[in-house]
């Protein structure tokens, strides 16, 4: 009996030692592990300091979500799934299939990730709404003048559209354009800014001339990528035309600064204990 009790105590002590050994940081007594830091560095291409900052911010956010008792219902989650599918001209089944092929996420994993994102957005909205005011007309005109590049865009994009039914084939073609693959089709096109979807327009603006866009799911099936051959010179849009966009940009900037300030203060006021960090 004594031997059994001794073994149990030794096992418990060893287990506790391993748990403590795996903990890197405590944020209000909640642990961040050595493994989590290493994984964050690898997945996000971050330095150790950046990974630690990101994980502490995530921990503070999750604690704030719990404190505010924020939640996402199953109805809200499924409505958001349907919205994402619709935005990509897919059924929900096609969306889950595309997510699996591109990100290797199962339906449950994708929904869990999406739910966490929705919770975070609810938190951000709650924090920002309590600390922000809408900009006035003069403020918007000044922002428009100082950030003219945000409200200018090419009128047309000269592209080559690459299409394949299999993601792997398209990836090989993008990596080696001289490779002849009959399963990959190519078609040159001139796309007017005014006639394409805003999401695609934003992607084409962001992609440099002589580069490919990331692979996209084709609503008609398969995958596409756009090679940017040329863009017309950017044209600045009249203020009245982009007034709503100016307001949205200003609110987004103010929201980001508000959130940054809020969580910087939360970090300063939180009890954070660094036990050890992964070896460099």
Image: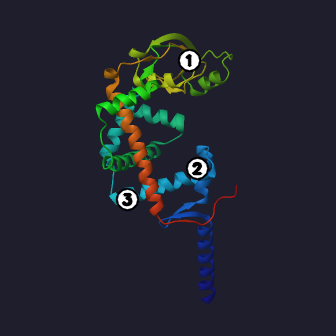
Numbered label tally: 3
Between the C-alphas of marks 1 and 2, the distance is 33 Å
Element marked by disc 3 = helix
Choose between 79 and 32: the one closer to the eye. 32
Choose between 124 and 140: the one closer to the eye. 140
Binning the other alpha carbons within 10 Å of mark 1 as few (below 14), some (14 to 19) or many (20 upward) gives: many
N-terminal of the pair, mark 3 or mark 1, is: 3
Element marked by disc 2 = helix
Element marked by disc 1 = strand
What quarter of the picture does the C terminus occupy?
A: bottom right
Up/down of 79 relative to 262, above or below: above
Choose between 121 and 7: the one closer to the eye. 121
Q: Is residue 91 visible?
A: no
N-terminal of the pair, mark 1 or mark 2, is: 2
Disc marking residue 119: none
What residue is pinned by disc 3? 66
What quarter of the picture does the N terminus occupy?
A: bottom right
Residue 75: x %, y % from top left: 30, 44
Q: Can residue 65 be seen in this view?
A: yes
Up/down of 118 relative to 219, above or below: below
Between the C-alphas of marks 3 and 1, the distance is 46 Å
What residue is pinned by disc 2? 50
Up/down of 61 relative to 3, above or below: above
Labelled pair 2, 3 in contact (Cβ < 8 Å):
no
Say which residue appears at 59% left-offset and 73% top-offset: 16
């Amino acid at each position: 009996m004594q031997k059994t009790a001794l073994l149990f105590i030794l096992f418990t002590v060893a287990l506790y030692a391993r748990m403590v050994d795996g903990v890197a940081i405590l944020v209000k007594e909640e642990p961040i592990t050595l493994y989590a830091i290493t994984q964050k560095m690898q997945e996000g291409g971050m330095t150790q300091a950046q990974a630690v900052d990101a994980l502490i911010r995530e921990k503070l956010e999750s604690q704030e979500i719990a404190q505010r008792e924020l939640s996402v219902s199953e109805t809200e989650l499924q409505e958001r799934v349907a919205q994402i599918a619709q935005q990509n001209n897919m059924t929900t089944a096609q969306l889950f299939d595309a997510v699996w092929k591109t990100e290797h996420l199962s339906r449950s994993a994708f929904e869990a990730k999406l739910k966490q994102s929705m919770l975070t957005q609810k938190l951000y909205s709650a924090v920002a709404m309590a600390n922000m005011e809408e900009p006035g007309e003069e403020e918007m005109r000044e922002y428009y003048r100082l950030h003219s590049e945000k409200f200018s865009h090419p009128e047309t994009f000269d592209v080559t559209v690459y299409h394949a039914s299999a993601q792997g084939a398209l990836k090989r073609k993008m990596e080696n354009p001289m490779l002849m693959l009959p399963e990959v089709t190519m078609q040159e096109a001139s796309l007017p800014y005014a006639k394409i979807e805003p999401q695609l327009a934003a992607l084409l603006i962001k992609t440099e001339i002589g580069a490919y866009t990331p692979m996209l799911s084709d609503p008609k099936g398969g995958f596409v990528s756009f090679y940017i051959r040329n863009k017309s010179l950017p044209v600045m849009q009249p203020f009245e035309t982009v007034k709503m966009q100016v307001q949205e940009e200003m609110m987004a900037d103010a929201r980001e600064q508000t959130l940054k300030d809020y969580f910087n203060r939360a970090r300063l006021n939180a009890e954070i204990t660094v036990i050890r960090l992964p070896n460099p």
